[in-house]
Amino acid sequence: MNNSEDLVERQDETAADLRIGAPERESARVALDAHHAVGRLDDAEREQRLAACEAARTHSELLESFADLPAPHPDLPCAPEPSPADDDISLLGWAIGVALVLGLPVAIVLGFAYDAWWSLAVPVGLCVMLLYVEHLLTRTRDKEPPSP
């Protein structure tokens, strides 16, 4: 396995394809300057690698410029942690909870007071409908191809 593959392997698999920006390119420039200062790179090769770093769009493309060089390498962030909002209850989940918390007591009162037990079907039916809508939205979201 060559040094480039080692560098990419050390990064998280999803991080290897993360897009880079100005901070990552600046870190690569600093690392190339350090290699140039100790004589590992001549002026032409340093300029060529800087151009490759400027053209790079992902972590793995940026690390290719350092495949045959020892440390230092650019300081690249790992894949971002999932946001806490991903674990939160969805809006439809809240709607289902509200429908149950408010709808069932009202339906029970109506059932006792007016002998309208059919009213229990309203909050239950609403919850079933909302669960089905959430299922459809989740299924559609999972089938969407990732945006480039």
Image (cartoon, grey):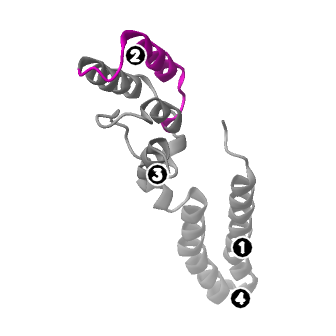
Which image quarter: residue 23? top left
Mark 4 Cα shell of 10 Å, populated few (<14), some (14-19), many (≥20): few
Q: Position of residue 29 (x, y in %)?
A: 35, 20
The earlier-in-sequence mark between 3 and 2 is 3
Q: Looking at the picture, which amino acid does disc 2 mark?
A: Arg
- Distance CA(mark 4)–CA(mark 2): 86 Å
Q: Which residues are magenta?
A: 38-59
Per the model, the C-alpha gap separating discs 1 and 3 is 46 Å
From the top left corner, tell me how far across and down residue 36 is, in percent: 30, 18
Seen at 33% across and 34% down, the residue is 73
Q: Contact (CB < 8 A) between labels 3 and 4?
A: no
Would you name the residue on which mark 2 appears?
46
Question: How far from the left and from the top, in percent, is residue 57?
Answer: 54, 28
User: Which is more foreground, mark 3 or mark 4?
Assistant: 3
Residue 100 lies, with reference to residue 22, above or below; the image says: below
Badge 1: few (under 14), some or many (20 or more) residues near its Cα, within 10 Å? few
Question: What element does badge 1 sit on?
Answer: helix
Q: Is residue 54 magenta?
A: yes
Q: Nearer the viewer, mark 1 or mark 3?
A: 3
Q: Which residue is mark 3?
A: 9
Please give the residue where the numbered disc 4 appears in the rendered image: 115
Question: Which residue, as the protein is rendered here, is positioned at the far left?
Answer: 38
